[in-house]
Amino acid sequence: MPKSVLITGCSAGGIGFSLAKSFQNRGVTVFATARDLSKMSGLEKLPNIVLLPLDVTSPSSIADVVEAVKAKTGGKLDYLVNNSGRQYVMPALDADIEEGKRMFDVNFWGVLRMIQAFSELLVESKGTIVNIGSIAAYLHSPYSSMSADNQFRSRVLTDPGIYNASKAALHMFDETLRIELAPLGVEVLTIVTGSIETAILTNGPQPKVSPSSHYYSLEKDIKERAKGNDGYKRMKADEFAEGVVGDVLRGATGKVWRGENATATRIASVLMPMPVMDRVLLNGTRLENPKS
């Protein structure tokens, strides 16, 4: 029986869509999921791909998908790829806490829901959990900052603090999960994702800064960052997916850094002094004098 993988967040234009194609091309049976089946248009034409509706914030939706996978695989799942993600760009003082909670519900709690629901299928197959993390977990960037460091000869797109926090939480969770699941024969792989060309920024809630905010003069900049209109280089999602699928199928565990600026961030997070990192992350944000 061929290996099987379930991937969350497979809407066209995103990482999940590209991962589904790459796994399918390697002969893996793919369960591709999204809240709206119509947004996965194109995948239904490929053999060995099953499209399923899934909302990772809904226990009943997850339960339905578990039953569908069990029926197809006989109660096993080789790979669970938690890719669903939500973005939120806003200075901390102006952030809508409820919106932040909705983001955490997808980026962190949704991952835990999926792992708990599919745990027995993964234990049965001695499978692997793949969580799509982010370099944002290592970069304490303002609202939606762009950082430049000539030593890297490139620019690093990072993300707002609340989003960063959701990814940092996921990374720490993965380290604990890896230890807890080892006795059960289940591996955990964290993909530390660099800058990738996807629709996550354009699909997220658009920021609206109040005229009374300390950052109101930066609203235009914040909105442009939220749309991803920054001109910085990003890796194509298909190229990223090919690398990740290769990592998964060769049995990689722990952390793997992939995507534009991932290597630079890995080095900087270890070797760059905090004051220097602060200056790098402030560059281009106009936060030195936000009222101007």
Image (cartoon, rainbow, N blue to C red):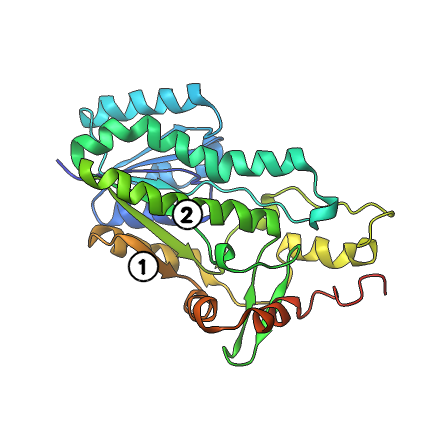
Q: Is tag 1's residue or tag 2's residue first in the polypeptide sequence?
A: 2
Q: Nearer the viewer, residue 270 or 25?
A: 270
From the top left corner, tell me how far across and down residue 21 is, in percent. 33, 47
Q: With respect to residue 189, does 10 lie above or below?
A: above
Q: Is residue 13 visible?
A: no
Q: Amino acid at mark 1?
A: Gly
Specify the quadrant that holds the N terminus: top left
Q: Tell me if 45 is positioned left or right of 155 in this view.
A: left
What kind of element bears circle 1?
Answer: helix
Q: How many marks?
A: 2
**145 left or right of 263 in image:** right
Q: Where does label 1 land, which residue?
A: 243
Q: Is residue 198 visible to the viewer in this orientation of the structure?
A: yes
Contact flag, marks 1 and 2 (Cβ < 8 Å)? no
Give the residue at mark 2: 172
- Residue farthest left in this picture: 1
- Callout 2 amino acid: Met
Q: Which numbered dot is residue 222?
A: none
Q: Which quarter shows the C terminus?
A: bottom right
What residue is at 43 percent from the left and 28 percent from the top? Answer: 54
Residue 179, compared with residue 230, is above or below; it is above
Label 2 Cα neighbours within 10 Å, binned few <14 / some 14-19 / many ≥20: few
Which residue corresponds to the image point at 66% horizontal and 54% vertical from the top-left?
A: 143
Residue at the spot x=52%, y=33% of the render?
105
- At 18% from the left and 38% from the top, the residue drawn is 183
